[in-house]
Image: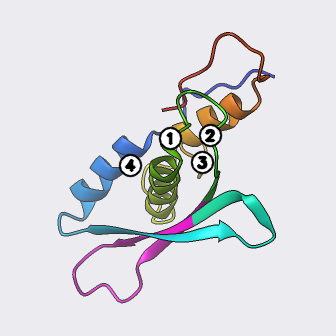
Amino acid sequence: MSYDISDYVDVKTRIELLFKEYPQASIQFEYMGVMEGNPDFIWGIARVYRTADDIRPSTGTCSELAQGKTAFTRGSELANLETSAIGRAIGALGIGLGKSMATKQEVNAAKARQIEPTAEKEVDPW
């Protein structure tokens, strides 16, 4: 199946747009651990505060395979998890949505997980 990712926004762009709209914004990430009932996945929560006194931050959750399936995701699973959660938290503010709440990184990562383990060429999802 072919995916057109041209209208998906990457997390870097969402972060840039966030700080353009909210210069005092703060991004916080909390690693929540292994998913209950599915130890193959880890998960976390990102919170985006628009100001220092923001009492209702935007949140984004995400899960990631605990062991990456590609050379590009193995060893950076937690960083990938954090990036995706941050992208979703910013998207929940309506910033940088493009085609979907999913970011360009998430779509590429999903594509990479579908590659057969015996495939010689791996896709860099980031």
Mark before the other along the chain sequence, 4 or 1? 4
Residue 10 magenta-highlighted: no
| Gap in angstroms between the C-alphas marked 2 and 1 | 7 Å
Q: Nearer the viewer, residue 112 or 8?
A: 112
Quadrant placement of the N terminus: top right
| Residue at the outermost left position | 23
Mark 3 closeness class: few <14, some 14–19, many ≥20 residues within 10 Å: some
Residue 102: mark: 3
Query: Residue 70: x percent and y percent?
Result: 62, 29
| Gap in angstroms between the C-alphas marked 4 and 1 | 24 Å
Residue in view at x 35 percent, y 42 percent:
13
Residue in view at x 76 percent, y 23 percent:
117
CB contact under 8 Å: marks 4 and 1: no
Residue 58 magenta-highlighted: yes
Mark before the other along the chain sequence, 4 or 3? 4
CB contact under 8 Å: marks 2 and 1: yes
Which residue is label 2 attached to? Answer: 68
Looking at the image, residue 63 lies above or below residue 112: below
| Element type at mark 1 | loop
Which residue is label 4 attached to? Answer: 14
Mark before the other along the chain sequence, 2 or 1? 2
| Residue at the outermost top position | 120
Residue 75: mark: 1
- Please state if 120 lies on the left or on the right of 77 as rendered: right
Residue in view at x 69 percent, y 30 percent:
111
Mark 1 closeness class: few <14, some 14–19, many ≥20 residues within 10 Å: few
Mark 2 closeness class: few <14, some 14–19, many ≥20 residues within 10 Å: many
Mark 4 closeness class: few <14, some 14–19, many ≥20 residues within 10 Å: many
Query: Residue 114: x percent and y percent?
Result: 77, 30
Please provide the residue range marked out in magenta. Answer: 44-62
- Please state if 82 lies on the left or on the right of 22 as rendered: right
